[in-house]
Image (cartoon, helix red, strand yellow):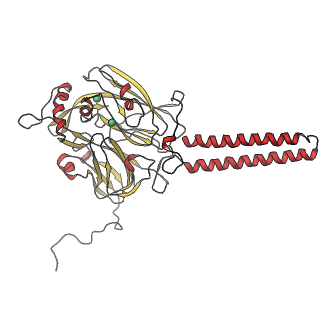
Amino acid sequence: MYCWKSVKKVINSIILGMQNGNLVVVKKLEITYFNSINQKLIKMMENKIKGMKALMLLAAAAFLVSCGGGGAGGGDPVVDREYSGDGDDLERVKQEMVAPPMVPEHDQVAKGGPKVVEVEFEIQEKKMEIAPGDSIWAMTFNGSVPGPLIVVHEGDFVELTLKNPETNSLEHNIDFHAATGMMGGGDISIVSPGEQVTFRFRAHRAGTFVYHCAPGGMMTPMHVVSGMNGAIMVLPREGLKDEVGNLVEYDKAYYVVEQDYYLPKDEDGKYKNIATANESMIEMEKSIRTLIPSHIVFNGRRNSLTGKNALTAKVGEKVLFISAQANRDTRMHLIGGHADLYWPLGKFHNKPYVDLETWNIPGGSAGAALYKFREPGDYTFVNHNLIEAIAFGAFAVVKVEGEWDDALMKEVSKAGPIQN
Ligand code: CU
Ligand code: CU
């Protein structure tokens, strides 16, 4: 978009220069106005200028294509970007939220110009079992941990309506890492029980970004580690690019977010069964200071993405894994697979890394990795601190169907007695 602006500037200055030149030519020729030879000359020069204009426009168009959506080396410096318009006059679309690990319906390559994407979140404070017998007063956006994934394109506006029903007991808000100003929206989105608020921000940076509740003071970390976080994916308008700059489209996308919980314990070392959301906040103020999570899980609770809830894919499918961790560093790994492409720290205008075994998700960020499954079987998707994965619960399973390919691995002989 910014690129188009600079191209327009170039075209305008070329046209302006030509028009000025044109005037000079015409004035000189006026002196011999009645000379028919010169009339022909004027015609010729006009045609020449027209031809030159067309050539210049062609060159400008080629430049526009070459600069694509910006990014490293794209001739579109991040710090020079300028924005105008507040989105009031743009087309509006509503995005229906879906529960994780699913992602809302979306185009990978944007159709048409920037839009205002309307999203609605209802805050739900609810008691939630996060492992057999262990429960927490979860703070949630739309009832799930994490909150739903939002998907828009770079240059779109996100218009969020945040509702805090009367039945809740606490004040909440939302801070979008994808937004600029006002504490990421946190300052203008504080809602008490019984209130709702609407605000709009321009999604002007491409990538995956965390959002979370941030009502201030100790309430901020406590709401975040009670589940009140999620992610937004801002796709480049022209779609994702691979390491050689070609469009790469995924067949499906999954949204897998790690959550660390700090359940308070009683004198016997058992997790407390807490009666109210308010009481939970008081108790948690002590337990989070240990910095030692009681649970580290994917998508809200232990085994949320295993067994009948396992993720699925087919051999040959390209799957985009969108991951996040709002509070704590983690490291994603697909056992038996890789990240074919991983956009550094989830930001799509960085050239993707290839062939990764494990990819970082620093606390307070979201990441995206794309993998084409090449062999069938069960793949475990883990936080590769394997203690956190197995002992705490930070793992998911991807069941992949399809034909086995000996070109990548072959069982030469089954396990049997050692032969000398
Ligand atoms: Cu909150
Ligand atoms: Cu934050």
Q: Quadrant of the C terminus?
A: bottom left
Q: How many marks?
A: 0
Q: Quadrant of the N terminus?
A: top right
Residue located 29% across and 43% down the image: 363
In the image, ligand 2 is in what quadrant? top left
Residue 151 appears in the figure: yes
Residue 1 appears in the figure: no
Residue that sits furthest to the left in the current view: 268
Residue 107: x percent and y percent?
47, 42
Quarter of the view holding residue 89? top right
Residue 137: x percent and y percent?
21, 31
Residue located 38% across and 25% down the image: 188
Q: Is residue 130 left or right of residue 62?
A: left
Quarter of the view holding residue 195? top left
Q: Is residue 208 left or right of residue 308?
A: right
Decide which of 163, 403 is in the foreground and name it.
Answer: 163
Decide which of 314, 143 is in the foreground and name it.
Answer: 143
Residue 371: x percent and y percent?
37, 54
User: Does 193 appear above or below 97?
Assistant: above
Residue that sits furthest to the bottom in the current view: 420
Residue 161: x percent and y percent?
39, 26
User: Does 144 appear above or below 333?
Assistant: above
Q: Is residue 280 left or right of residue 63?
A: left
Q: Is residue 383 left or right of residue 33?
A: left
Residue located 26% across and 21% down the image: 167
